[in-house]
Amino acid sequence: MTTHTTLKRTFPLLHMSCAGCAAQVEKVIARQPGVQEATVNFAAATVTLTYDPLLTSEQALRTKVQEAGYDLILETETEKEETEKNRATNV
């Protein structure tokens, strides 16, 4: 039996100017394959996603957000390494 691991991550969003923008971003992301939940926080300019990394990638989601006229900020490789180091030391 194969188990799919879902990830829950929060990403900063750029170029939202109103609650309608937040609703549009949420709608665009929620329609993508592998996305189980997308919640945009307009006040914090973030989106919290629950998704299956085997069905979609952060870059694919970013591309869809960019096509809608906004931007999803992904961690750089250095930030990912720092995150992994922090996880390893907290185990």
Image (cartoon, grey):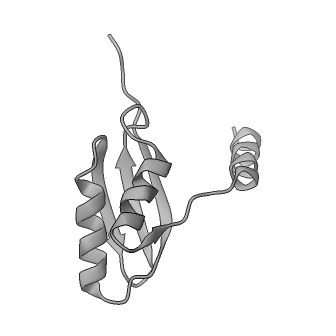
Name the quadrant containing residue 48.
Answer: bottom left
Name the quadrant containing residue 40.
Answer: bottom left
Identified at 36% across, 34% down, the residue is: 55
Name the quadrant containing residue 63.
Answer: bottom left
Residue 36, position as x, y percentages in the image:
27, 46
Up-down: is 77 above or below 48?
above
Identified at 45% across, 58% down, the residue is: 62
Residue 51, position as x, y percentages in the image:
36, 44
Placement of the N terminus among the 4 image quadrants = top left
Identified at 24% across, 83% down, the residue is: 20
Residue occupying the far top of the picture:
1
Left or right: where does residue 89 sit relative to residue 60? right
Of 66 and 26, the residue lying toward us: 66
Residue 43, position as x, y percentages in the image:
40, 85
Residue 66, position as x, y percentages in the image:
42, 66
Residue occupying the far front of the picture:
67
Identified at 44% across, 82% down, the residue is: 15
Placement of the C terminus among the 4 image quadrants = top right
Up-down: is 37 above or below 65?
above
